Image (tube, helix red, strand yellow):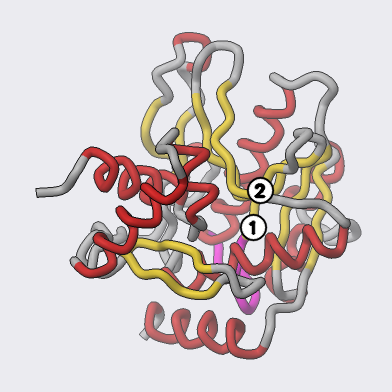
Amino acid sequence: MLTSHQQSILETLRLSGQPLDDDELSRRTGISPRHSVNQACRALQREGLIRRVPGAHGKLVNLLGDGAVEDEPTAAVSSGLKNALASPVTDPGLRDVEVLEVPPGNSREQREAERVMLDLLGRRRGQTLSPSRLTVPSGAQVELDGVDPDRTVLVECWAHQGRPKSAQRQKVLADALKLSWIRSTLSPPPELILCLCDPSAAAPFLPGARTWAAQALNDLDIRLEIVQLPPDVLGAVVEAQRRQYR
C-alpha cells in the first residue's frame, strides 16, 4: 500500500506532465524535509512506479514509470480550436473555457525533451524556468511548462520534429489560448513564449507565415522561440514519433 507521501508525489507527477526533481516535488507537495521526498521517490522507483534519471544539468529528476502511466489517447484531436479542448473548467466565470486533452504524439520522450527545452531556453535568457501550477484569482488552477520565480515570463513547450499536422496545430493554439488567458489574470502582465525545437514545426506560426494562426500569435504578443535539442534527446523524440505514426 502506498503512503500518503508516495500518493501525493505520483499525483503531482501526473498533473505536471514533466520530470521533477526532489526539490521541486518538495515545493509542490509541501512534503518536508526534502529527505522525505527522496525516500518516497526511491521506494516508488523500486516498485516501478517512477523512474529517476539525470536531468539536463545532471540532477536527478523523477518521472512516471510504466506501472503508473495511464494509457494515452491515440485518436486524433478534432479540427477546430474548440474541438481540441476537452473537460470544462469548474470556475463559474469560465464556463466556456475548456482544458486540453493530452494530444496524440505526447510521448514520454517528448515530455522529457520539453523539460530539456525549458532548461535550454532558460539558459539562453539567463533565467530559471520551472514547471509550475498557477492559481488565478477565481481559484482555478492551471499547469504551465515554465515560469520564472518572479512570474515575468510564462512558457509552453512542444517537442515535435517536422511540419505539424492539423490536429497537432490545435495543441499549439490551445497552449496559446492558455497563455493569453493566464496573462489576463496577472499584473503586471508577463511575457508569453511558445518554445519549439524544430523550424519546420514552428513554420506555420512564425511571423510572416501566411496563416491566421501566425497573425493571431502576433496580435496576442506571443513570441516563438526555437531551441536546438542535444543529439541524443533529438534522436529519442524522432524515434518516438516514428512509433506513433506507424
Question: Badge 2 local density, few (<14 within 10 Å), some, or many (20+)?
Answer: many
- Up-down relation of residue 159 to residue 214 (above or below): below
Q: Which residues are magenta?
A: 158-166
Whether residue 74 is visible here, answered yes or no, is no
**Type of amino acid under label 2:** Gly
Residues under labels 1 and 2: Cα distance? 8 Å
Check disc 2 and report the residue beneath it. 146
The x and y percentages for residue 233 are 59, 82
Front-lying residue, 66 or 245: 66
Confirm whether the magenta stretch covers residue 163.
Answer: yes
Q: What residue do we see at 69% from left, 43% from top?
A: 147
Q: State yes or no: discs 1 and 2 in contact (Cβ < 8 Å).
A: yes
Q: Quadrant of residue 91?
A: top left
Q: Residue at x 80, y 44 (%)?
A: 222
Q: Position of residue 21 (x, y in %)?
A: 51, 57
SS for callout 1: strand
* Residue 169 falls inside the magenta stretch: no
Q: Which residue is located at x 82 percent, y 36 percent?
A: 152
The answer to whether any part of residue 76 appears in the image is yes
Tell me the kind of residue under disc 1. Cys
* The C terminus - image quarter: bottom left
**Mark 1 Cα within 10 Å, few/some/many (few <14, many 20+)?**
many
Question: Looking at the picture, how far across and down is residue 119, in whole percent?
Answer: 70, 63
Provide the residue designation for mark 1. 157
Camera-nearest residue between 219 and 7:
7
Query: Is residue 2 or residue 92 the one in the foreground?
Result: 2
